[in-house]
Image (spheres, rainbow, N blue to C red):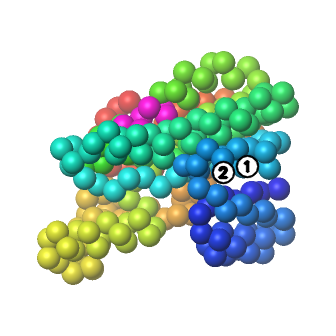
Amino acid sequence: MVTLNGRDAERLNSAKDKIGKATGHEVRTIVADLSDAKARASLIEICGDADILVNNNGGPPPGRFQDWDEISWLGAINANMLPALMLIRGLLPGMRARKFGRIVNITSAMVKSPMGPMGLSTAARTALTAACKALVPEVAPDNVTINNLLPERFDTERQQQMAKLTMAMKNITYEQAREEIANSIAAKRFGRPEEFGDACAYLCSAQAGFISGQQLQLDGGSYKGLI
């Protein structure tokens, strides 16, 4: 069974219907905020026998280092580091006992290419990456893999928000803002959600059992580094 978690019941039900119609399989939805410890505990209790865990959570907005106080940093950690680690901690024993587990963390391309305005998100997600990398050798003998997807510029609501922000900052039209963002990508286009989904599905498959501790860039060829 597939279990979907989110904070918006209407959007969850819409996704549930789409997946159910496409696959013919039962889909369960749970409305919960991953930043809340009690909500995470409920998720772990309900999904204790999960073989696949895909971690994702909304990140903090762009800003400036001088404006981020201690509360800001703790908020980022409690959104983009601790929830994923606590869910992994809760579900990992069952995966190891059953000798199959696939864990995928959706982080950000900026884990490997940090930018100042996204410092809160980058720091918390990089910490998650390091913690999981350290765990990989321990769980690999039990056929449990942990990998990270590093997306950038996928055509989702997030990019619509970024385009509107660019509009306001540069006093340009929405179409101009979208074009400017697309041109910043090596492929000169936004990524498609289905391309992201296919990559995630592969990392969750039995065929990907020898891939673990990796950071898969999904950025249209924009990353300039070798490693």
Q: Which secondary structure, mark 2?
A: helix
Relative side of 174 to 208, left or right: left
CA–CA distance in space, label 2 to label 1: 5 Å
Q: Amino acid at mark 2?
A: Ala
Task: Residue 181: say if magenta.
Answer: no
Relative side of 19 to 133, left or right: right
Q: Which secondary structure, mark 1?
A: helix
**For the C terminus, which image quadrant?**
top left
**Secondary structure of the magenta portion, mostly?**
helix
Residue at 42% x, 52% y is: 59
* Percent position of residue 124, x then y: 41, 38
> Is 96 above or below relative to 12?
above
User: Which of the two residues, 191 or 44, is positioned nearer the viewer here?
Assistant: 44
User: What residue sits right under mark 1 in the picture?
Assistant: 42
Do the residues bearing badges 2 and 1 touch, measured as CB atoms within 8 Å? yes
Can the viewer see residue 208 in this picture? no
User: Which of the two residues, 19 or 205, is positioned nearer the viewer here?
Assistant: 19
> Is 43 above or below relative to 163?
above
**For the N terminus, which image quadrant?**
bottom right
* Percent position of residue 213, x then y: 56, 29
Stretch in magenta? 123-129
Residue 32, image quadrant: bottom right
User: What residue sits right under mark 2 in the picture?
Assistant: 39
Residue at 17% x, 78% y is: 172
Q: Amino acid at mark 1?
A: Ser
> Is 186 above or below relative to 143?
below
Relative side of 27 to 140, left or right: right
